[in-house]
Image: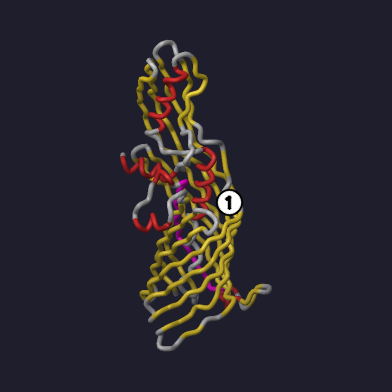
Amino acid sequence: MREAFIFLGMLLLCSTSYAGLFKIVNRTGTCVLACDSLETEVNSNLPSADQSNYLRGMANASVSSQKGLGASYGSNIDYLEVGFTGAIGADLGSNSTSDLIGGNVDYNQIRGIGVGGAVSLGLKGDLFGSSIGPLDMKRTAFYGYFMSLDAPTTDGLDGDSTSMGFHLRYKLIGGGGAGLGVFDWGGIDITTGIERAAMSIKFVKGITETVTSNGATASFNGTATVGADITTYTIPLEISTNFRLFYVASIFGGLGMDLSFGKAKSVASLTGDISVTGGGTGVASLDLGSEESPSLFAMRAFTGIQFNLTALKAFILLNKGIANDSLGLALGIRLAF
């Protein structure tokens, strides 16, 4: 159960001035004061969230979860590549990257999380001819990816995600080497395309709380369902380079700009009644807002390392937002021919 709480905490944002997800409205009589304490107690069992940022964080995390699923950054494609990649995106909120590296993350401060996975295929452009319009096919590579994931229900947590996209990479400047495979520069590439991410996630938790305050006892016994349905579309524009050392490892990095659209819609429902001694009444509600979009325009930096075991390539890729708190991490393996 603890793991489910941690994961749900990663889905939702904590604001320093949040009022909480659980609210008691239409108060009368003894509920007016006693229900303040009940609200506080129930919210202490739910992730700290604020409707103004929860859905935006989920949408931005969804965009970050697509990075690394398609185009390959660690090497230059010769003919074709096939591979599998898993990725996770997050809106870190008030956590810093150093907190993450040091293991001092406050999960309730993370605004949102997205999950992606894909089987990918990359093809060298000159397989389709010498040129297409202004594009020199010897300098061009095409990448496509797709995967749908359906997670099993665990401790009330249920979700699924679908990732798909297409990338076009063009080599602006050719690279070169120092000989004997000691050092090889891969040149400068520019990459664009379109990425689509869809994720649905919800968490169901039973809540039973009773508090006594100001001479009245207030109780709630019910079930809360918290989650989101997210669909995002992104047009990336990236410039990158890579360096290979002794044929064994490649270091790569670059800058990216994302133009993103889509929606994150809240999933929020509450069953159960408020009971108050002394004739008080109140109505329980769960407020996550309605819908939000990802940041329309965002810049990021990315870096990673790839290990080259003849045709097998294994890599790790880190993306970090420059103007926002997004973070993406991808791990993958590919066969290059």
Q: Residue at x 50, y 60 (%)?
A: 145
Q: Nearer the viewer, residue 105 or 91?
A: 105
Q: Quarter of the image for the C terminus: give it.
A: bottom left
Where is 337 relative to 213, above or below?
below
Residue 182 locus on image (x, y percent):
40, 84
Q: Which residues are magenta?
A: 111-125
Residue 180 locus on image (x, y percent):
40, 88
Q: Residue at x 42, y 23 (%)?
A: 272
State the residue lying farthest toward the right: 133
Q: Nearer the viewer, residue 125 or 43?
A: 43
> Which coloring applies here?
secondary structure
Q: Nearer the viewer, residue 64 or 15?
A: 15
Residue 133 locus on image (x, y percent):
68, 73
* Neighbour tally class for label 1: few under 14, some 14-19, many 20 plus, Cα within 10 Å: some
Q: Residue at x 46, y 33 (%)?
A: 21
Q: Is residue 118 magenta?
A: yes
Identify the image quadrant of residue 52: top right
Q: Quarter of the image for the N terminus: give it.
A: top left
Q: Is residue 117 magenta?
A: yes
Where is 220 relative to 195, above or below?
above
- Residue matched to label 1: 295
Q: Residue at x 58, y 51 (%)?
A: 295
Where is 321 relative to 131, above or below?
above
